Image: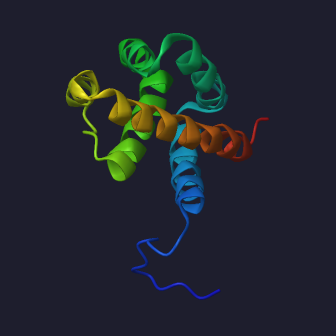
Amino acid sequence: MHMQAQNDGSHLSLEQRRARHAWQKAKAGVKAHGSDYVNTAKALPALIMNSGLMQVMAFCHDKGGRHEKVAEHLRDWLHITCGTPQEFVSFMEELMQSDATEFQRINTEAMAWLKWLRQMAAARDENS
């Protein structure tokens, strides 16, 4: 399949765009943090289900390092798909001000993207 250099991916399905974004972010995350990035990516969905998106984003920001990198990558995706701010404080403030429907939409999209990141990060990790 021939793709033009300036292809913005708009013809791709949402699942394909999630996969492509996760693939790209996993490359950077694994390069910077190795298997630690993979383990964090794998743990995040369960943490969010148990504690909630905002609590986990605050936790990742506080921990820094690989945790902040995964959260930064997630915020980037949510910025693209949901229009939320990329910067941590603005992101948190937006979530706090969101109505229940919008908050659920953001949370659902976060979980959908993280499913891809888990797989892509593991595939990118040469030490696994």
Q: Which is more toward the observer, 12 or 124?
A: 12
Q: Quadrant of the C terminus?
A: top right
Left or right of 111 on screen, residue 57: left
Q: Position of residue 30 (x, y in %)?
A: 59, 39
Residue 6 higher or lower than 49, as above or below? below
- Residue visible at 42% across and 46% down in the picture: 77
Residue 40 can be seen, yes or no: no
Residue 59: quarter of image = top left
The colour scheme of the drawn protein is rainbow
**Left or right of 50 on screen, residue 63:** left
Q: Is residue 76 left or right of residue 125?
A: left
Please name whichever residue, 113 or 101, is drawn nearer the observer in this view of the structure: 101
In the rendered image, the vertical position of residue 46 relative to residue 24, given as above or below: above
Q: Is residue 2 visible?
A: yes
Q: Residue 81: image x %, image y %?
A: 38, 51
Q: Nearer the viewer, residue 112 or 3?
A: 112
Residue 63 position, x and y percent, is: 42, 13
* Count of numbered circles in the view: 0
Residue lying at 64% horizontally and 39% vertically, measured from the top left: 115
Which of the 4 image quarters holds residue 85?
Answer: top left
Report the front residue among 62 and 19: 19
Residue 4 placement (x, y as % from top left)? 47, 86
The quadrant in which the N terminus is found is bottom right
Where residue 72 sits, quadrant-wise, is top left
x 59%, y 52%: residue: 23
- Picture layout, residue 110 above or below residue 13: above
